[in-house]
Image (cartoon, grey):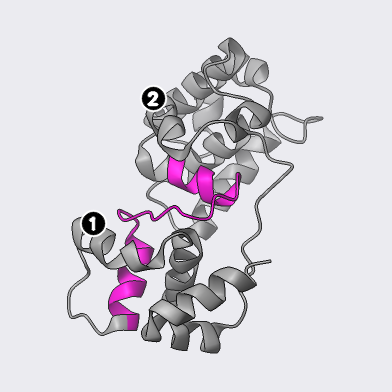
Amino acid sequence: MHADAERHLSGVDHVLARVIREVGPCTLRPRRNCSPYQSLVQAVTHQQLNGTAAQTILKRFIALFPGEKFPSPAAVLAAPDKQLCSAGLSRAKTAAIKDIAHKAMTGDVPTRRAAARLSDAELVTRLTELRGVGPWTVEMFLIFTLGRRDVLPVGDYGVRCGFAKAYGWREHPTPKELLVEGERWRPYRSIAAWYMWRVLDAK
């Protein structure tokens, strides 16, 4: 699926070429059965937490709504804040999730089909108006839900840390530095970011 991206990245960056050889083919796949509303709620849950802790809280959150694969916006809005916090969500995240649910019902959170017609910049502008949703949250949505291939989350700690490790930098690159370094990865910066995460995972 990403063979063209891997060939391009290997041709423009010898360090990334080595990483690609060591890691192997990119297995990044968009979550096609995930709505923008669901994706944003999941992303907010993951903010400032490691993956294991976030997944635990997310499972508890979903378990509050038996009979639903994922709680509907209406169900979330009807639930008392105290109930949502009992799953491990902070007050700030509870407020953010309720705002996302409200905006999903009013149409401010686009459907997947509507989102597919919008550019990355348009989605960032539109979705960062939601409470608790910043550029990083939208970038995760673009990469993992919509499958956009040219998104570079320069503020992501894992990407910056993986870059420093792969390229031998003593300090993590600043977002501005990473933006400049990542120019050579266009139009496959999402794939390059995925490999930086894999570098961080490697021993």
Q: With respect to residue 169, does 59 lie above or below?
A: above
The residue located at (27%, 67%) in the rendering is: 181
Q: Which residue is mark 1?
A: 175
Residue range corresponding to the magenta coloring = 138-166
The answer to whether residue 203 of the structure is visible from this angle is: no
> In x, y percent, where is residue 189?
44, 61
Q: Quadrant of residue 163?
A: bottom left
Check disc 2: other Cα within 10 Å, few if <14, some if 14-19, many if 20+.
some
Determine the residue positioned at 47% across, 36% down.
89
Residue in the image at 33% along x and 64% along y: 182
Near mark 1 (Cα within 10 A), the count class, few <14, some 14-19 or many ≥20, is: some
Q: Nearer the viewer, residue 6 or 44?
A: 6
> Quick one: which residue is furthest to the top in this view?
106
Q: Please give left or right for residue 85 compared with residue 135 in the image.
A: right
Residue 173 visible within the image: yes
Residue 50 picture location, percent across and down: 45, 58
Quadrant position of the C terminus in the picture: bottom left
Task: Tell me: 5 left or right of 134.
Answer: right
Residue 48 drawn at (x, y percent): 37, 49
Mark found first going from the N terminus, 1 or 2? 2
Residue designated by label 2? 131
Q: Are marks 1 and 2 in contact (CB under 8 Å)?
A: no
Report the amino acid beneath label 2: Arg
Q: Amino acid at mark 1?
A: Pro
The residue nearer to you, when weighing 44 against 32, is 32
